[in-house]
Every structure is written in structure tokens, then in C-alpha cells.
Amino acid sequence: MSLTRADLESSRLHNMISQSGLGMQLLSESQLQESIRLTLNSHKSSSDVWLFAYGSLIWNPIFKYTERRVGTIYGWHRRFCLRAPVGRGTPENPGLVLGLDCGGSCRGVVYRIAEKDVRSELSLLWRREMVIGSYIPKWVKVVDGTDEVMAIAFIINRHHPDYAGKITFEKTVNIIATAAGELGSSAEYLIQTVEGLKTVGIEDKQLLQLRSSVLEQQQSN
């Protein structure tokens, strides 16, 4: 299964993490709202807000938007670098999910959120992406053909205890092939991301190789 809008409105994700027994530090609603305020104030933008998606926000956005484009950012790349001891894994066998890590480039989807929806939709996004502080909201330049927009992207927080750092391809395959939690398996997350990218015309060769190796391992077990 995947997160729904109702899950975020009812604080299901927050409760799932708080009840995990892991003692993870959760940001309060007031802290999330302050983070939104600081993010919006840190960049002069038009009344609408753009958001850059590179993983599950492509195939399961669950927020309101008025426009969607494919674009590229530079200086960051998509990588399975965040451990997931809940959601896509368990404390005994943590899964892995995507983050934007330093270096390279990344093709993804950029969404435009209308001014009238900015407050409500960013609140949902912050409850989803920022609840344990594993990401850092950052303004990035998204290049779309001859056009450019500044958008918010959720960059991996390298100082977070669940940042996986540099792990081998083989270890990444093993984790994704075996980990599963309340929101589904890490393998499903990978496959849905590959398919979501495909629907907008993006082919990520590293993710395709990863998917092939994960499926191969699962079939051999």
C-alpha cells in the first residue's frame, strides 16, 4: 500500500513512527509550519510554488497541483541513501528509500502548486517528507528545455542517523529485495518509482539495473 492524503491529514504516518518504539525524534506541527515559513521566506518567488519530485512524489503525489513538467536539476542525484526502519522496512530489517545526494544530476518532475493551495499542500508535504528531519527543503533550479524555474526539493540530510552513506550495490540490492514494512516493501517502492519515471519518459539506467538485480535475487530465494 501507499500513503494517502487521508493518512497525512489524520497524522497516520506520525503515529506509525511514534509507536514504532525506536524513539525517533518527530517534529511537531508547529515546527513543521515554522520550517515551511522559513523555506518560503528564504527565496523570492511568485505566488505559486514549484516542487521538484524524484521518487514517490512522481507516482504518488497526493497533493493538488495545476501543472506538471519534466525537468533536470544539477548538483544532485537520485540515490537509495535513506534507511527506513518503519514504512518500507522494520527495525530488525530496515528498508531503503530515495534521497537527493550531492553530485551529478537528476531528471524528475516539477509541479506547480497554485497560490490558493500553497499553505494546505505544503503542510501535507511537510508531514510526509519532514516529519523526522531526514530531508532538508532546498530551492533548486529546474531546467526544462529552454525554460527554468526555482523549485523546492527535499535533499537528504547527511547528518541524520538514518542516512545510509555510501553502501555497495550488492548491499543495496539485498536490502531492497528483503525489507518490507507497514507501507509495503522496498522492492515495490523501487518498481513503482521506475514505472512512474517511465510514464513521464524518464529512463534511469541505475534504477533499471537495480530493479533487475532485486527481482533476480527475489526469484532465486
Image (spheres, rainbow, N blue to C red):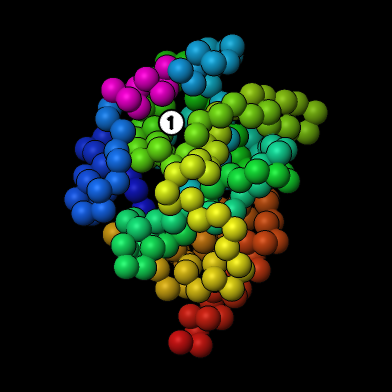
Judge from the rendering whether residue 120 lies leftward or rightward of residue 44; answer left or right. left
The amino acid marked with disc number 1 is Lys
Main secondary structure found in the magenta portion: helix
Residue 189 appears in the figure: no
Q: Residue at x 21, y 54 (%)?
A: 21
Judge from the rendering whether residue 129 lies leftward or rightward of residue 78; answer left or right. left
Give the quarter of the image for residue 116: top left
Magenta extent = 30-37
x, y percentage for residue 161? 42, 49
Q: Is residue 31 magenta?
A: yes
Relative vertical location of residue 61 with respect to residue 172 in this rendering, above or below: above
User: Farthest residue in the bottom direction?
Assistant: 220
Give the quarter of the image for residue 15: top left
Relative vertical location of residue 77 with respect to residue 179 in this rendering, above or below: above
Judge from the rendering whether residue 5 lies leftward or rightward of residue 56; answer left or right. left
Residue ID for mark 1: 64
Under circle 1, the secondary element is loop
